[in-house]
Image (cartoon, rainbow, N blue to C red):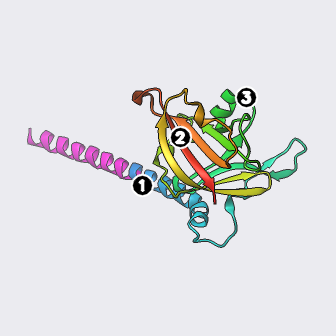
Amino acid sequence: MTARHSSDRHAGGRRSLRQTLLLVAGCGLLLAAAGIAVTSQWDHIAYALGLSDRGDPYVTERSTTARGTAKKSLYRLVIPRLGINVKIRNGGRARALRLGVWHQPNGASPRTRGNTVISGHRVTRAFVLLDKLQRGDRVVVYWGKRQYAYRVVRVYETGPRDKRVTRCGTRKRLTLYTCVARVEGDRRVVVVAVPV
């Protein structure tokens, strides 16, 4: 009986050691993935914080046209504090929102006077942290071949029928908005920024 008990203990010890090694290996993989995610964003973070003089990394993204030539992605929204760097989409609302953020065509553009309105879903993760922006945070819009920098002046919640959010007006500003989590009701998070 003692010999059997002894072999059971060794088998249990091997099993425990195997489980521990798998756990350690899994944690190592998670930490490595997190490190890769941070280092892949380092150029963007360093530029946004003024720690890099390597030029603007946001405009270097290239895509391929129908003719096969490379061109820069000319319409982007960058929010350094949240790590957001997404292409601004135009066209059909539902499709554009599924792919990222959408410039509402009834508003202005960064080139013109008025309210440039950009919306995004929380579920596609483009604006999942939009409510974490604070007064003074920097937002950059690349529109055509120009860069437009903004400073956040207001972050608030409102109802879905609030027309002031999308009203064009004549003052030059940028409005970003998204829905709040469904468990919190039918509300919108709105960020208003002005040119710097």
How many neighbours does mark 2 have within 10 angstroms: few (below 14), some (14-19), or many (20 or more)?
many
How many neighbours does mark 1 have within 10 angstroms: few (below 14), some (14-19), or many (20 or more)?
few
Q: Is residue 156 above or below residue 41?
A: above
Residue 136 visible here: yes
Image position, residue 190 (x, y; %): 53, 40
The image quadrant that residue 177 belongs to is top right
Q: In the drawing, what numbered circle is on residue 190? A: 2
Amino acid at circle 3: Gly
Q: Is residue 14 magenta?
A: yes
Amino acid at circle 1: Gly
> Which residue position is annotated with label 3?
92
Between circles 1 and 3, the one closer to the viewer is: 3
Give, as a single range, the part of the protein colored magenta.
1-25
Q: Is residue 140 magenta?
A: no
> Which residue position is annotated with label 1?
28
User: Which secondary structure, mark 3?
Assistant: loop
Magenta span main SS: helix
Q: Left or right: 53 with respect to 178?
A: right
Q: Are marks 2 and 3 in contact (CB under 8 Å)?
A: no
The earlier-in-sequence mark between 2 and 3 is 3
Between circles 1 and 2, the one closer to the viewer is: 2
Quadrant containing the C terminus is bottom right
Give the spatial CA distance, label 1 vs label 3.
Answer: 43 Å
The earlier-in-sequence mark between 1 and 2 is 1
Q: Residue at x 68, y 61 (%)?
A: 57
How many neighbours does mark 3 have within 10 angstroms: few (below 14), some (14-19), or many (20 or more)?
few
Q: Nearer the viewer, residue 138 or 19?
A: 138
For the image, the number of numbered tags is 3
